[in-house]
Amino acid sequence: MEECTVAIKYELIKVCKQSGARLGRVHTPHGVIDTPTFMPVGTQATVKTMSPEELKQMDAHIILSNTYHLFLRPGHEIVRQAGGLHKFMNWDRPILTDSGGFQVFSLSNMRKIKEEGVEFRSHLNGDKLFISPEKAMEIQNALGPDIMMAFDECAPYPADHKYVKQSLERTTRWAERCLKSHARPHDQALFAIVQGGMYEDLRKQSAADLTSMDFPGYAIGGLSVGEPKDLMFNMLDVTVPLLPSNKPRYLMGVGSPDALIEGSIRGVDMFDCVLPTRIARNGTTMTSSGRLVIKNAKFTEDFGPLDPECSCYTCQNYSRAYIRHLIKADETFGLRLTTYHNLHFLLQLMRDVRQAIMDDRLLDFRDAFFAKYGLFDN
Ligand SMILES: CNc1nc2c(CC[C@H]3O[C@@H](OC)[C@H](O)[C@@H]3O)c3nc(N)[nH]c(=O)c3cc2[nH]1
Ligand SMILES: [Zn+2]
C-alpha cells in the first residue's frame, strides 16, 4: 500500500542487545504509542470504573473497544451519530477495536459459521444476528478507531489440525474481503490476525498468506485460549519472525505480568487483556511482590499501601485496610481503587520494560522481576 493511504506508521527505535526485544513508536491519527505497550480494555466504550482523565493520569496511550459488544448495544449507528467512539467516550488518544470474531465464538450460542459470515444469537436478548467481514468493517468504520481488526475465527483450543487448517484458510479469505471493503485506509489502519492454532506449519501458512497482502500491522490471534503458557510462547517463537519488522505486532488477549515480559522479549509490540480490570472487581491486585487478594482477613488492620513500591493514586492515598473494607462492603469506590492500581501497575511495568530495552538489560529485568513477583503468599 503506498504511504499516503496508510493511517499509521511504525518507527523502530532500537533492539535490545541482551534480549532481541524492540523499542518502537506507532504514529496514529490520534497520537503516538510507545511500544511495547499494554492497552487497557474498554469493551463497551468504557474501561470499567475509570474516567478518561484517570487513564491519562496513568498515561495509557491507547485503549480497546469491541465491535461485537457495540454492535449489539447501543448499535454502531448511534456511535456514528455521536461523531465516532473518540467523541462518544470523550477519549482523544488512539483507540483499537477488535472485530468481534472472538466474541461471536465465545459469547454467543447457536452460531453457524459459513463462508459468507457467522450467524449467531445475541447473548443479550437472543436476537438472530449475522456478522460478515463486510459487516465487521462497516461497524468499525462507524466506530472510527485508529486501528481496526480483520474479522476472523479464533479457533478453539484444543482443535484438530484439519479444523484449524480450514479455519485459518477461511480467516485468510475473510481478511481479503475486509481489505476490499476498507472504506477509509488513510484514517484507519486495518490489522490482519494470524491464526493457525498450536500447529507450527499452520502458523507459518497463516502468516505467509496474510503478510503477502501487506497490512499496516499484524495481530497474533488464537492464543491465550487456555493453552499452557509455554505452548503460547512456542507459537510466538514460530510466528513473530515471520511478521515484517517494520510493522507493529499485537498479541491479542495477553496481559499477565510474566506474559507481557516474555512476549516483549519475543518481539511483540502491543498487548491487551481484561485481566487487570476483571480481577480488580473481585479485589485481586497485582503488586511488585505478586498477587494480593485484599479480602484476606490478614489485611483487616494493615494500614500500609497496597504496594509500598507503587506511586499510583491508590497507593499514595489509601490503605489495605480501607480498600479491604470497601470491597467487603461492596462499595463501588473500592473497585475503582483496585482497578486504578492494577492498570497503573501494568502500564508502569511496560514503562520499565521499555527502559530496560533502552538500557540493553531486559533479561536482567525479567529475572529481577520474577525473583520478587512470586514471593507473595496471600
Ligand atoms: C483472552 N484471550 C484472548 N482474547 C482474544 C481475542 C479478543 C480480545 C478482545 O476480547 C475482549 O476481551 C475478552 C476484549 O474486547 C478484547 O479486545 C481475540 N480476538 C480476535 N479477533 N481474534 C483472536 O484470535 C483473539 C484471541 C484472543 N485470546
Ligand atoms: Zn498502586
Image (cartoon, rainbow, N blue to C red):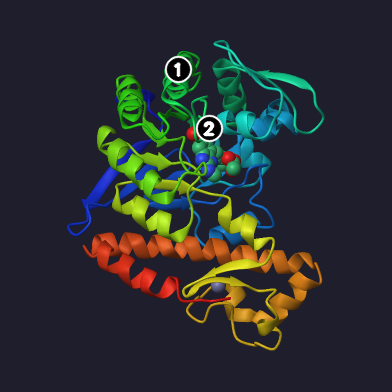
The local secondary structure at tag 1 comes to helix
Q: Residue furthest top?
A: 116
> Which residue is at 41% across, 48% downward?
33
The residue lying at 25 percent from left, 50 percent from top is 13
Write down which quadrant ligand 1 falls in. top right
Q: Residue at x 53, y 32 (%)?
A: 156
Residue 12, picture quadrant = top left
Quarter of the image with the C terminus in it? bottom right
Q: How many labels sit on residues?
A: 2
Q: Looking at the image, which is closer to me, 27 or 20?
A: 20
211 or 312, nearer to the observer:
211
Element at badge 2?
loop
Q: Is residue 269 shown to the viewer in this render?
A: no
Q: Is residue 286 left or right of residue 87?
A: left
> In the image as oriented, which residue stretches furthest toward the front?
160
Q: Is residue 129 above or below residue 243?
A: above
Which circle marks residue 156 in the picture?
Answer: 2
Residue 101 on image: x %, y %: 56, 28
> Against 108, is 43 above or below?
below
Q: 207 or 340, which is in the foreground?
A: 207
Say which mark, if any, is on residue 260: none
Q: CA distance from mark 2 to mark 1?
A: 13 Å
- Local crowd at mark 1 within 10 Å, few (<14), some, or many (≥20)? few
Which image quarter is the N terminus in? top left
Amino acid type for the residue under numbered disc 1? Gln
Which is nearer the N-term, disc 2 or disc 1? 2
Rendered location of residue 172, percent (x, y): 42, 19
- Image location (x, y in percent) of residue 118: 62, 18
Mark carried by residue 166: 1
Residue 292 falls in which quadrant of the image? Answer: bottom right
Q: Amino acid at mark 2?
A: Pro
